[in-house]
Amino acid sequence: MPLQQDAKSNKSWIDSRIKQEEIDKYLKNGSDFIPDEEIWDVLNNAKKPSPKILKQILAKAMAVETMSPVELASLIKIDDPKVWKKLAQVAVKIKKRVYDNRIVTFAPLYLGNFCVNDCKYCGFRRSNTEVKREILSIDEVKKEIESLVGKIGHKRLIVVYGEHPKTDIDYIKETIRAIYSVKVKTRNGEGNIRRVNVNAAPMSIADLKELKKAGIGTFQVFQETYHKETYKKVHPEGTIKGNYHWRLYAMHRAFDGGFDDVGIGALFGLYDWRFEVMALLYHARELEATFGIGPHTISFPRIEPAFNTIFRDNLKYKVSDSDFKKIMILIRLAVPYTGMILTARENEKMRREALALGITQTDASSKIGVGAYSNEENIQNKKKEQFVLGDSRSLDSVIQELARMGYITSFCTAGYRCGRTGKNIMELLKTGTEGKFCKLNAILTFREWLDDFASPETKEIGEKLIKKEILEVKKKMPKMYKAFINYYRKIEGGERDLFL
């Protein structure tokens, strides 16, 4: 059936998606929390901070306190490379304090590319008739997981769903259950996916409650652009995504639906990066003020080429590498407790440099074609991909590089299963307590992965790093060392999924 006809036949489903009452309940005097004019006024009126003011702002960031818009705007005004170098150094110190030296890895998993929306920058847009549309069956989903778990060694996923009746809440729940059900024998133990995060379309509170019951972790929805006029231009009217407020309040509904870990983000390149960074701060502050919980993660992808999509050509607001680094520094300073996700959209060089700017999570061995992990024919099939990746290195290669740089790769999902989420984790992050658990569990999961999947060279490099990390635990965390080393020895002996 042609896509246009398919959209018409699904009109009742489309019309039922947006619940206006679940927008109105959050508006304040009919207004939302992204005041475009105010943001620009703050930006335009901001002045470069004096040394004294800069010191105060950075002290606040080091104390893991969220910045004010005025403080962030003043940092954006800085034009001295030496000062930016100082900001980067502070960003790294904050990341080290909050999350220690670990980098969490994950894999994106695309289960379908049908979509009723028509976003101008997206390869999956409804009007792109050249895309090969596909949705994985439950058996095909399990095959993807067998490859991700058994061949690569991933423990956590971000599962991506398009907005379409074929991938509605029932399909999402069923596929999540299937993902968690897969157990695979590894070199020395058994592997499985322990954390499923979801990047999906905004949902009603009722659907979100159902989704939470299915056992997902973080619920991600990116606003793409917070600038209302630009949002309207790139998201055609008459589509679900064309409703700015339905998307803007997706995280509010998620909290009311029972979630306590949410992820926000913007697609940089659609509008002025300075506005988008400010808006991300406004969003974080709104969530903190309303629910007492800020975003668990913030993502900041740059727009990339997409099959049969010319939108990226001659971008007015294209973000340079230099400005992109500023974005990462500013987010780490402005929302110091949040996890920061840099994806394989970026090339190897940028990903390497970004590690020194406060990044906490990244993907590896990524394939964004539908069914691409288990079916070799799908790997290079651009007609099944949403955009083009910049880094296609294996997980082993990425981990080896991280280890050489002194970063320990973490597959930890302990905090979520121990209840260190939502309001419970905010204080732990601000005091540096969570970072201690991060280090301990990172070492345990790294030991698992080295034994079960690492190449000989990567294992050798990883062993040296682990010895260093264990010595640090013994010295700095003597009270926790006994329990930690007991679990570590058990994992060496073949036990799996032990955590503190």
Image: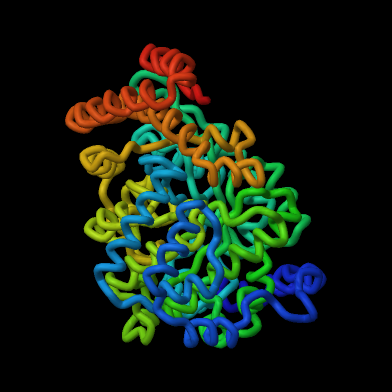
- The color scheme shown is rainbow
Q: Which one is nearer the viewer's eye here, 244 or 444? A: 444
Q: Is residue 143 above or below residue 137?
A: above
Tell me which corner region of the image, top left, top right, bottom left or bottom right, holds residue 482.
top left
Residue 320 visible in the shown view:
yes
Residue 82 in percent (x, y) is at: 25, 68
| Side (left or right) of 14 relative to 164 | right
Left or right: residue 189 versus residue 13 is left
Judge from the rendering whether residue 298 lies leftward or rightward of residue 485; answer left or right: right
Residue 287 location (% of width, % of height): 65, 61
Q: Is residue 321 above or below residue 431?
A: below
Which residue is found at the position 31% from the left and 56% from the top? 89
Residue 28, given in percent of the width and then of the height, sits at 77, 75
Residue at 48%, 21% in the rendered image: 480
Q: Quadrant of residue 161?
A: bottom right
Classify the position of the N terminus by image quarter.
bottom right
Q: Residue at x 26, y 39 (%)?
A: 406
Q: Does residue 381 appear in the picture of this structure?
A: no
Q: Nearer the viewer, residue 160 or 115?
A: 160
Q: Nearer the viewer, residue 344 or 445?
A: 445
